[in-house]
């Protein structure tokens, strides 16, 4: 769900049989000359928030302070099992608010889980992994939690269920089920496929670090809420015995804040304007 | 007693938005076809230029040519067309500060802020810039700045980026249907304002929204090829 790093080395994939090719980093003037929707979506306000040379989050087009909604959120619920609200992790993609830095979640994951590649999956609009720590709004009902991430505005759903879906298809969000252990929400996710890329700054030679889900990737999250309702703590364990014998442990703390409403951002636009060939427009 | 009644009434008013929220929240599937007509069942009053464009789009589509349609290369269908994409349900979630329209189609999300004032305009955007408020149990959304290269429906009904849509979302038939009453003001495209009503049926609350990746569905990228390249 990241679209974080700078525009360095936009790599285009071979779509329907063509080879991968390297595309030069666009210049500021090229960005300015981009079609208006691209300027507006990516270059216009995102430059205000996260200068292009520092990278940007896909949904980094966060409204500046003068456009913050005038309707104020209620105080956080003290119900330890009510996770509704906007949860902000300053270290997560999509968590950048004005003045925030460029985070690197999962960058210290063990070798095997993280690989090095010339492919920049984020530029290809490849499906990304749902369990990655993200800032966003959580909606909750008796059937599920719906997490709407600020970064690229993708939704992840976690179902209250006793068992995984039989033969669940591999997806970016995977098959996420949850149950309560006391006031801890335990989320178990399997059937994942997809990437987390941009785990670090672009490396020499246009290489990227990337975390790839094998069909064996298993993520367990244990999420608890602080007694004052202002913080969610998510202890994650990422395990993939097919690539690493070492589980990767990660703890993320989210703060309850006012929603920073974002604007449309479409990955397909980025690839389109920077030369990725998505093929003929004549098929439907 | 009166004081107690007034206090209860005040509490009821405070929690009213939550009750309103429950009305349109849920999972919805379009009943209306993805070809807009006015509430009188007529083709909207296009001006001569727009009518020619519309006819051109229809003629091309009849031949299987969708080169005019960015949706065919996975660009967002825009507003209100995304809600009408065939066989793709969407979820509406409501909070005090925003309403989320979470579409199955290519995993698109539309955020409608309950902002109380005009949003800062930096568009255009596929879903436009929306300002919303509640009128009783009806969510009233004003949409501006919709990207011009989208069409209002799958038939290719054009608009300009100066179009203003006023959408009124509310439930009917005991909450089992969602109505979106839409007023279209786009004098650069239409000879007069017009109205349409879109209908959606409620799906069971435990319906699971599937993951749809348009680029893969359209075979515009090849996940397996990329995955194998990285693994190697």
Image: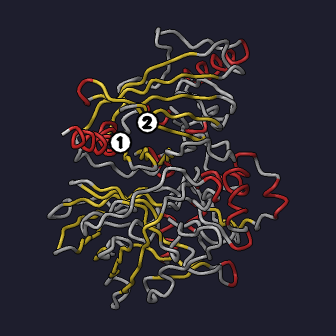
**Whether residue B83 is situated above or below residue B4 in the rendered picture:** above
- Which numbered marker is on residue B180? none
Q: Circle 2: is it few (<14), some (14-19), or many (20+) Cα within 10 Å?
A: some
User: Quick check: can you spot residue B26?
Assistant: no
Which chain is home to disc 1?
A: B
User: In the image, residue B128 lies at what x, y percent?
Assistant: 60, 40
Callout 1 touching callout 2 (CB < 8 Å) = yes
Seen in the picture, residue A183 relative to A107 is either above or below; the reply is: above
Element under label 1? helix
Which residue is rendered at x = 33% and y = 38% of the image? B20
Q: Which residue is mark 2?
A: B134
Q: Which mark is residue B17?
A: 1
Q: Is residue A254 visible?
A: yes
Q: Position of residue B76 (x, y in %)?
A: 55, 42
The foreground one among A23 and B70 is: B70
The one of A272 and B27 positioned closer to us in this rendering: B27
Is A240 or A252 nearer to us in this picture? Answer: A252
């Amino acid at each position: 769900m990241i679209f974080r790093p700078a525009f360095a080395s936009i790599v285009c994939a071979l779509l329907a049989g063509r080879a991968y090719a390297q595309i030069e980093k666009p210049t500021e003037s090229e960005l300015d000359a981009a079609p208006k929707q691209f300027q507006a979506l990516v270059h216009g306000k995102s430059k205000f928030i996260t200068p292009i040379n520092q990278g940007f989050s896909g949904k980094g087009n966060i409204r500046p302070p003068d456009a913050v909604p005038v309707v104020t959120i209620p105080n956080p619920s003290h119900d330890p099992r009510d996770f509704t609200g906007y949860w902000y992790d300053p270290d997560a993609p999509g968590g950048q608010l004005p003045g925030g830095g460029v985070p690197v979640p999962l960058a210290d994951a063990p070798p095997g889980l993280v690989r090095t590649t010339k492919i920049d999956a984020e530029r290809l609009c490849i499906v990304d992994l749902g369990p990655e720590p993200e800032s966003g709004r959580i909606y909750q009902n008796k059937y599920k939690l719906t997490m709407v991430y600020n970064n690229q505005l993708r939704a992840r759903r976690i179902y209250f269920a006793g068992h995984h879906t039989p033969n669940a298809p591999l997806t970016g969000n995977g098959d996420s089920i949850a149950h309560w252990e006391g006031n801890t929400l335990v989320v178990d996710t399997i059937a994942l496929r997809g990437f987390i890329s941009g785990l670090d700054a672009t490396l020499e030679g246009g290489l990227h670090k990337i975390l790839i889900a094998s069909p064996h990737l298993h993520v367990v999250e244990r999420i608890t809420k602080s007694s004052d309702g202002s913080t969610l703590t998510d202890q994650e364990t990422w395990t993939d015995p097919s690539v690493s014998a070492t589980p990767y442990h990660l703890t993320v703390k989210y703060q309850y804040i006012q929603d920073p409403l974002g604007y449309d951002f479409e990955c397909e636009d980025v690839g389109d304007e920077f030369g990725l060939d998505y093929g003929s427009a004549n098929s439907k | 007693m009166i004081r107690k009644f007034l206090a209860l009434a005040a509490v009821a008013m405070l929690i009213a938005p939550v009750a309103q929220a429950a009305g349109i929240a849920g999972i919805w599937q379009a009943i209306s076809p993805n070809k807009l007509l006015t509430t009188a069942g007529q083709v909207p009053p296009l001006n001569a230029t727009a009518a020619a464009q519309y006819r051109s789009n229809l003629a091309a589509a009849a031949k299987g040519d969708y080169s005019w349609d960015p949706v065919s290369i996975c660009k967002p269908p825009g507003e209100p067309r995304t809600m009408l994409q065939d066989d793709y349900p969407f979820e509406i979630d409501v909070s005090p500060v925003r309403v989320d329209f979470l579409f199955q189609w290519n995993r698109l999300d539309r955020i409608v802020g309950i902002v109380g004032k005009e949003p800062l305009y930096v568009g255009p955007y596929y879903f436009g810039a929306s300002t919303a408020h509640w009128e009783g149990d009806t969510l009233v959304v004003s949409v501006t700045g919709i990207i011009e290269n989208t069409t209002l429906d799958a038939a290719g009904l054009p608009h300009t980026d100066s179009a203003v849509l006023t959408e009124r979302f509310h439930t009917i038939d005991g909450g089992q249907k969602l109505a979106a009453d839409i007023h279209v003001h786009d004098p650069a495209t239409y000879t007069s304002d017009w109205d349409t009503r879109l209908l959606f049926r409620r799906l069971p609350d435990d319906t699971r929204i599937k993951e749809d990746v348009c680029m893969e569905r359209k075979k515009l990228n090849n996940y397996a090829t990329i995955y194998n390249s990285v693994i190697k």
